[in-house]
Image: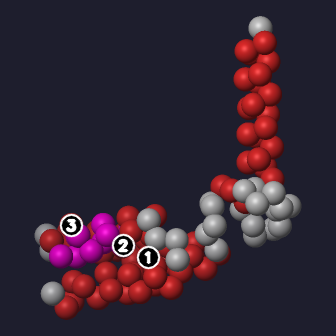
């Protein structure tokens, strides 16, 4: 019975940490706490725009059987999940956006 009580207490502690955020600060209107890690709002917006452009590239590449556009669209949709730095994300997305036209 004590193991169950300890498990429930541990779950309560985890819930408090999730609600308060990783740094223990209070959440503001635009601060998503530990849900998004250390992503800024600019990184989220750049990721959203890259995903939209990538979706368009993917659909166009699939429709016209253009392998370069298809791969570039998939990369634009997936890569923002792995890059947290805003400047690096912008550089990578611009390079992937131009890649089908350069190669």
Residue occupying the point 61% across, 69% down:
39
Q: Tell me: 14 left or right of 64.
A: right
Residue occupying the point 75% across, 56% down:
21
The N terminus lies in quadrant: top right
Q: Looking at the image, do the residues carrying marks 3 and 1 touch, with CB atoms under 8 Å apart? A: no
> Which mark, by number, is residue 62?
3
- Residue 11 percent coordinates (x, y): 74, 32
Q: Looking at the image, do the residues carrying marks 1 and 2 touch, with CB atoms under 8 Å apart? A: yes
In this rendering, the answer to whether 94 lies above or below 56 is below
Q: Within the image, what quadrant is residue 40 found in?
A: bottom right
- Residue 92 percent coordinates (x, y): 38, 81
Closer-to-camera residue (41/87): 87
Residue occupying the point 23% across, 70% down:
71
Closer-to-camera residue (10/102): 10
Q: Within the image, what quadrant is residue 75 found in?
A: bottom left
Q: Residues within 10 Å of mark 2 (few under 14, many from 20)?
A: many
The C terminus lies in quadrant: bottom left
Read off the residue under disc 1. Answer: 50
Q: Tell me: 27 left or right of 39.
A: right
Q: Which residues are magenta?
A: 68-77
Q: Tell me: 47 left or right of 55.
A: right
Q: Is residue 87 visible?
A: yes
Q: Earlier in the sequence, mark 1 or mark 2?
A: 1
> Which mark, by number, is residue 76?
2
Q: Main secondary structure of the magenta part?
A: helix
* Label 3 – label 1 distance at C-alpha: 18 Å
> Which mark, by number, is residue 80?
none
């Amino acid at each position: 019975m004590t193991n169950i009580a300890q498990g429930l207490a541990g779950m309560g502690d985890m819930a408090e940490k999730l609600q308060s955020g990783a740094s223990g600060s209070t959440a503001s209107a635009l601060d998503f706490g530990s849900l998004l890690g250390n992503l800024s709002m600019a990184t989220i917006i750049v990721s959203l725009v890259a995903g939209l452009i990538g979706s368009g590239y993917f659909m166009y590449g699939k429709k016209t059987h253009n392998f370069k556009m298809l791969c570039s669209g998939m990369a634009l949709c997936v890569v923002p999940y792995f890059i947290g730095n805003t400047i690096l994300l912008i550089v990578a997305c611009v390079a992937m956006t131009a890649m089908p036209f350069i190669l």
